[in-house]
Amino acid sequence: MTDPLLTDSDGDGTDDGDADADSDGLTNAVEMIRGTKPIDPDSDDDSLEDGEEVNTYRTDPLKADTDGDGAEDAAEIRFGFDPLVRNDSFDATAEAEGKVTATARLTVNGEQLNTLSVKADDNPTLFPDDMPGYIGEAYDFYVDGTFDKATVSFEFDKSLLADPQFDPVIYYFNEDEQELEELDTVVLGNTASTTVTHFSTYILLNRKKFNDTINSFLTDTWETGDYKSVETVFVIDDSGSMTYNDREYDRLQVAKELADGLPESGKAGVVSFSDSTHIYTDKLTSDKNEVKRYLDRKFFSSYGGTYMYSAVDSAMNLFSDDSDDTLRLEIILTDGEAFDTGMHSSVIQKAKQKNVKLYTVGLGSSESYFARYLEPLAEETGGEFYVAAKAAGLKSVYESIGKSIDLSVDSDGDGIPDYYEDNLVAFNGKRIIADKNNPDTDGDGLTDGEEVEIRVKQYGKKAIVFGRYHSNPRSGDSDGDGLYDGEPRYINKNGKTIKAAPKDMEPLKMNGHRRFWDAHVKSQQEGITTDYSVSPTKGEIKDEINRDIKRLLKTTNDKKKQDKIKKAWKMLVDSAAGLFDSKGGNVYGKKKTRNVVKNSMNLSRRYLSAQTMADVGAYILCFKLDVDHKAYHSSDKNWQKYFGYNSLYDMVFDAATDMNTQRVTFKSGGESYALWMWKGDYLNLNSGAEIGLYSSPVGSGDKIHYAKIKAVDMNLSLYKYDTYSIQTIVNWYPDDPQWWITGFSGARKEFRHPRAKRLFVIGRVKLGKLKNGFISSLESTKDNKKLQNI
């Protein structure tokens, strides 16, 4: 902004009229003639600078849509249309480049052209670059409204065509079902295309690699149990026949491997039999090394007879007292006929009484004996029966038993059976791996079962068990946006624990710029402001005004101009004298106050220096400078509380050059409430943001006028950002409760006249002190997605 007290404000040798204050390619003098804003490079907010519009495109810098066809000038230029020629419709092409180039071709109207976009979706959980069949990024295609049809295309590397296994197909991401749906795809050269009737997220994959991976998860066993722990006894044949049926003691190695895979909380024991029973572990133990120590050749001799039933019976005495949430099983391996089959019925009865499942494994060729004795032992006790013709086949048998155990047991109680802690497949073909001994693998405060939902999709007699992500159990920040899935982010400042960022309400969707939340937390760690400083007094404000006006009077000998300046001088001094009496009463009345405030703002912008202008604006609004001299803020004692939201105070925003507002309305206890948010360029105070909490409509029939409610704890952070940087304007954590919290940068040069869309605001409103039902009413409002409740 130029200083009206000087001919050459910045001392660069160029008079202010010939200067270009906003660097948009138009001098200040030209901007004054054209009616554009000399301190705003894009007066009509259409993403084209005023100089571009006048000198290059010949479009109207005061009209976002010069030809009036609904499409803004910048959109027409971006998509290759003439912004000076009115169009009834647009045959548009939008594209984005990455490892593959994604393109959308469709016919839209002018308003739709403004919103048409194709952007890479780099969500690390949903579309990782190591998913099977990956060729390039997934892309989000978007346009407002509906359309008849569109062609979606992906251009890929030509060299991929040399691979005979390459089969490029476009998939649609069904977000509701979390599935990739194959689309009819036409491949011409190195471009794959499909026709769609709505936009969403699409990805090009090598179908063969993708399908091969998905199909590898087909299984014929997927039913699960709900046991919390497991007790296992290995009952192993050590009779003489094992000399030739298992010469290499494979039976011990497979038992060791199964023992290794048991849950950490599980217990096991070892029993062998020949002419007699040998119990190596006098009680079950959770020490796997102890169990494996006895699964060694030095404890086995492959000698003697086969008294299997006696060993099975004795092994049952090792189990703990009955507990419904513990899986008890014996894994019984034998290669021949037992000498004590007369115990068959009594062993089955005892197993049922003790709730022990008998898993039986027949090794060798005694099939009729196995079918007559081993199979009934398993079936009647709820176990499973297996046969291995040779010792080499025991590995797959014991792996199946291990799977059965893992399907039945949820060791960590997170809602996911042990087997599926590392055998679930996501829709994208990636295996979901969690820790079966830790209910919260990534330590984010959410159990693995809360983060992943098990879904079974059957294909005839087989099925694939999918894991549907609610969030990623191996990442505390599933979408990579800097917000944590399961809990807010905290910092420790001056001995206090401060909630720096909210819990992510949408863990699979990016909220804000990828780098933003990390930068926000770092900024708060580096410094927050908690108290007000001593603001300029009424007398000091008058002195500032007098100084600037006197300097300004010296710049002209024109009597008329001097009279005009003196009139503005009196007006500004009167305003600075105070709009309200010492008790907060309105001196002028609402209508006159409105005019006084508005005129004061306009006059200060015209006649005062940047610093004085900021101080006057802050004084009139009763804002105070914080102790770090970074920003101006409201307090609970501001005069605005007598008028409430959207009444007197809102008229001040007539002076704003660029702003965004948002209002969330809701009801609780029969009363209406509003949570109001604002950010933008406020000419006197520059970059700023506000949040207000209001209740109960006041006034005759006016449903959007509210009065302030009880003060609560509030925080406000404001940033200016672009593609390359994030700058902190203020981190305001006032010690006192607020009903209305603000932060304005004042005269700080680097934050003057920003674009509202380049300001990012984070507000925290602590609602806990308000009456019951208030928070739930706010959360249930249809506008609740506008909020992060922290």
Image (cartoon, rainbow, N blue to C red):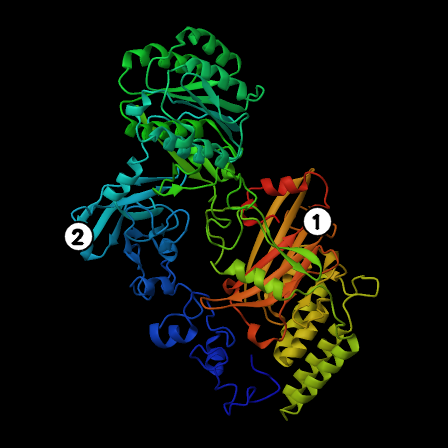
Residue 422: x and y in percent read 41, 38
**Disc number for residue 699:** 1
Left or right of 738 on screen, residue 246? left
| Mark pair 2, 1: CA separation | 72 Å
Is residue 588 in view? yes
SS of the residue at dot 1?
loop
The answer to whether residue 449 is above or below residue 732 is above
Which quadrant does the N terminus fall into? bottom right
Amino acid found under the numbered disc labelled 1: Gly
Amino acid found under the numbered disc labelled 2: Leu
Residue 631: x and y in percent read 65, 69
The answer to whether residue 275 is above or below residue 464 is above
Determine the residue positioned at 48% across, 74% down: 36
Instruction: Name the N-terminal-most of marks 2 and 1.
Output: 2
Determine the residue positioned at 54% across, 48% down: 504
Left or right of 146 on screen, residue 168? left
SS of the residue at dot 2?
helix
Between label 2 and label 1, give the one nearer the viewer.
2
Cβ–Cβ below 8 Å for labels 2 and 1? Answer: no
**Disc number for residue 161:** 2
Determine the residue positioned at 53% across, 41% down: 440
